[in-house]
Image (cartoon, grey):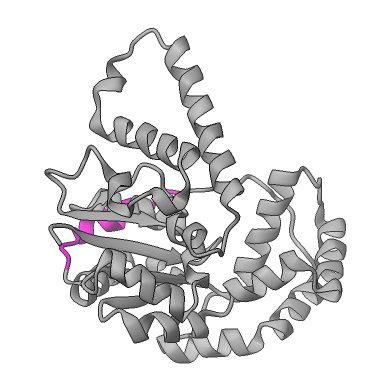
Amino acid sequence: MKHRFVIGIGSQRAGSTLFHHLLEESTHIFMHPVKELHYFDTLYGFRAKEGLKDYSLRQMAREVEKIVTAKDLSFLHAKRYKCYLRANKTLGMHPIEKIHYLDLFRPCLMNNKLLGEVTPEYMLLDDAAIIKMKQVIGENAAIILICRNPVKRLLSAVKLMNSYNNLRLNNETAGIWIERMMTDNNSWMLAQDKYNDYQSAIERYSRHFPHFIAISYDQMVTEPTQTAEKLANALNIQVNSERFKLAAEKIVNNLGSDFSVSEDVVEKIAARYQQNQQFLENFFGFPLIK
């Protein structure tokens, strides 16, 4: 294989957008302009095919509008932009089974031997899917799992839900909504449980990829230089620690949702994820930010 892949696999609401930006700023990895390709989770049935198709076509429609209203079209000549358009067109108009993963990175393959993306949902793949994934990207691929305090990750997921679905939650109603979700154990809540199950993801991926590493969101933000060195050593890639540090200081993916919940609700969430929290603190050897 002429190319090597560096793939972030999670978790949702644990700094995946920030991590994509950090790798883009501090390494020679060509980070795909479509941050979340959702290729493997869709291919192996962990995500609805129609969902990826609809999302990709919406992205295409947005870019068409941008092009037809632009006064200066010089940006069309950039290979990175062509890659963005081509990937969305391919994912939106062709069956996922007919798409080769490497083809999504065209026309940026010739001078980029390191190729990367970050799709949090890859964290959910089971052993059978991971084995198939390895056959596509090769055993030498680098896999990075970003882990976050389960309570803070859930609260961030609630803010995302509030923003995307216009729930208009406030300090009081957010707590009520969260408690109802935990009581009902509906599909959304069960999905959050899976995203907080870092232990299972670590065990599955470390079985199949020798260049697998789990990093702490807290450490990535508060100790970026150490995180950069850890990534470089574990994955055998060059990381500019100074650029990594400077990029980490920028706020990325701020939804602007400004509610908070009571300590009582926080304690109930913490009780639900006590084992997940304890595993992470034992795994990393330090307490996660509360």
Q: Which residues are magenta?
A: 237-251
126 relative position to 33: left or right: right
The answer to which image quadrant residue 22 occupies is: bottom left
> Which residue is found at the position 87% from the left and 59% from the top?
172
Can residue 63 be seen in this snapshot?
yes
Residue 27 placement (x, y as % from top left) = 21, 55
Residue farthest toward the top in the current orientation of the protein:
71
User: In this rendering, is residue 173 above or below 272?
Assistant: above
> Which residue is found at the position 32% from the left and 65% from the top?
224
194 relative position to 26: left or right: right
> Which residue is found at the position 59% from the left and 75% from the top?
196
Asked if the stretch drawn in magenta spans residue 190, the answer is no
Q: Quadrant of the N terminus?
A: bottom left
User: In this rendering, is residue 224 above or below 208?
Assistant: above
Q: Quadrant of the C terminus?
A: bottom right
- Given residues 57 and 235, the one toward you in this image is 57
Residue 208 placement (x, y as % from top left) = 33, 82
Residue 216 placement (x, y as % from top left) = 42, 74
Count of marks, rendered view: 0
Residue 163 placement (x, y as % from top left) = 70, 45
> Which residue is found at the position 47% from the left and 92% from the top?
282
Can residue 27 be seen in this snapshot?
no
